Structure formats: C-alpha cells, structure tokens
Amino acid sequence: MSEEFSPRAQRLRDAGHKLTHARLTVLSVLEESGGHVTSAEVLEQVNERDSTIGRASVFRTLDLLTALSIIRPTFIHTSLTPTYVLLPDGHHHHIICTNCNRVIEFEECGLGAMAAELEQRLHVKLSGHLLEFYGLCDRCC
C-alpha cells in the first residue's frame, strides 16, 4: 500500500527529492499553520514534534521549498525575518497595512496574461508569483 502525500509533498517528490521525515515535518508545519509562519515559528513547531530534527535540516528544507516555489519568503511585518507563505497553485496575494500590519489576502490578481507574455517574450517557464500591495486598511485610514 502506498502512502498518501499532500500535493506539495508530491511536487517535492516529482522534482526528484526524497520525502525525508524532516522535510515532511517542516512541510506539515507550514501547511497546518496556514502558510504564514516565520522560520523561528517553524523551528519551534518542528522541535515540538521531533526534537531530533536540527536547525540546519529545517533551513535547508525551507530553502528547497522556496526553490521549488512551494513557499515564498515575504516581509509582511517589515521585519528582517521573513514570513513564509504557501503558494497555492503557484501564487499568493496580500494587501499589508503599513500602520497595523494587518494582512488581507485576496485570490484574483489578473496576472495570468502577463505571466504568459513574460514566458513567451523572455523564454522562461514561470512557476509562481507573490503579489503584495502596501497601504492603509479600512481600520487605519
């Protein structure tokens, strides 16, 4: 009987990478957190699940997941520590309030045509994008 893996874990496997316990634990933490989590929070939650998984394994996994466009680091709270966001279907979108740091997610971005044009014109194959707008939310304006 074969194991069931999340679509993101399957993408990792399809890209030729082993589904190690450490990688699956980090990915599980990201998926269960809703995909908005700092590296410190990932480290803490991974340690709670399995204290034998080291910092280096966690950071290598975050780097690998970033390279595969499964997650993307972003600086939501204008800090030096990135917040990692999951890229469902290869993209993710935010509006971030510059006063209270409220994060408003939205689905539609209208970038499909631009992505297709960029792929054709620049001879690349895009795997995802992260779109962030900054401004004041309705509570702060």
Image (cartoon, helix red, strand yellow):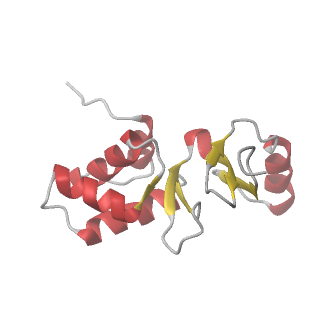
Number of numbered discs visible in the structure rendering: 0
Farthest-out residue, front: 140
Instruction: Please provide percent x and percent y for residue 34.
Output: 45, 41
Q: Tell me if 21 is positioned left or right of 97 in this view.
A: left
Q: Quadrant of the rendered structure where residue 6 is?
A: top left
Q: Residue at x 65, y 44 (%)?
A: 104
Q: Residue at x 33, y 47 (%)?
A: 29
Instruction: Please provide percent x and percent y for residue 118.
Output: 83, 56
Quadrant into which the N terminus falls: top left
Farthest-out residue, bottom: 80
> Front-most of 103 and 118?
103
> Front-most of 14 and 8?
8
Q: Is residue 35 visible?
A: yes
Q: Is residue 126 visible?
A: no
Q: Tell me if 134 is positioned left or right of 40 in this view.
A: right
Instruction: Please provide percent x and percent y for residue 116.
Output: 81, 47
Q: Tell me if 137 is positioned left or right of 57 in this view.
A: right
Q: Residue at x 30, y 29 (%)?
A: 4
Instruction: Please provide percent x and percent y for residue 105.
Output: 64, 41
Farthest-out residue, top: 1
Q: Residue at x 13, y 59 (%)?
A: 51
